[in-house]
Image: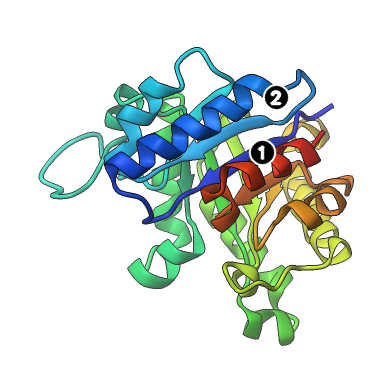
Amino acid sequence: MRKKLVAGNWKMHKNLTESQALITEIRGIVRDEFRQNDAEIVVCPSALALASSARLVEGSEIQIGAQNVNENKEGAYTGEWSASMLKSAGATHVIIGHSERRQYYNETSEACALKNKAAIAEELTVLYCVGESLEERESNQHFDVIKDQLEKGLEGISSEEMSHVVIAYEPVWAIGTGKTASSEQAQEVHAFIRGLIESKYGLNIAESVRILYGGSVKPDNAKEIFGQPDIDGGLIGGASLKPRDFFEIIKAAR
């Protein structure tokens, strides 16, 4: 049985003081209300708040993730963070290939593969994002797009290393728009992704890899989405900035 996972992506929100207040509030709710069958919890604050957030959740059920990583171990890469730096700051997870990174910073799936390898080498768990645009969905290209992103992004990742990989399917047209893929649409793509993993790595790995859904998940639609057989939790954007909403989504993954 795959344990559900709910990850919150704060994106570029909250200054240091606000981040510390938010993570403290989430920690308090989790401390008081978390049950053993609740989902695994990951919170991904800005790089600014990474280390302090990790300290604030020590001893709790909350793990800390980063929103990006550089593929190099070290060097003259101004403004970048290596996987070892993220790990030293307390991160256990890292988001790679988010559609906003692809769109605004021209991040390719080939570049993501290098980042995935670098993160896994430091034993970070990768949340590797794939997903299609509205134009690609409407022209029925979404399966081809996702296959290409998945195959290129997992290039060079061994069967053993797949234990450090979580896939996040995020239809670009549903991120921050208020639109959500229907549970049937999401399940169809998740099953397709699991089939691609099976063809590359075999049935056992395909059945163990967790695949998350992201795209305007809220407390009122989370239970139906997470109830699908191939959906193993969510990568949550805006709702993760609201502690009560975020925890209600975590509970929906029970």
**Disc 1 element:** helix
Give the left or right position of residue 140, taking residue 55 as reference. Answer: right
Looking at the rendered structure, the kind of residue marked 1 is Phe
Give percent across and percent down for residue 2.
Answer: 79, 30
- Judging from the image, what secondary structure is the residue with disc 2 in? helix
The answer, for residue 71, to whether it is visible in the render is no
Name the residue furthest top: 59
For the point 61% across and 55% down, which residue is it?
A: 150
Of the pair 176 and 15, the residue shown nearer to us: 15
* Residue matched to label 2: 33
Measuring 41% from the left and 62% from the top, which residue is drawn there?
101
109 vs 1: above or below: below
Q: Identify the residue position indicated by label 1 in the image.
A: 247
Q: Are marks 2 and 1 in contact (CB under 8 Å)?
A: yes
Kindly indicate the quadrant of the structure image that contains residue 31. Answer: top right
Instruction: Give 62 or 1, whichever is nearer the viewer.
Output: 62
Residue 246's x, y, as percent? Answer: 63, 44
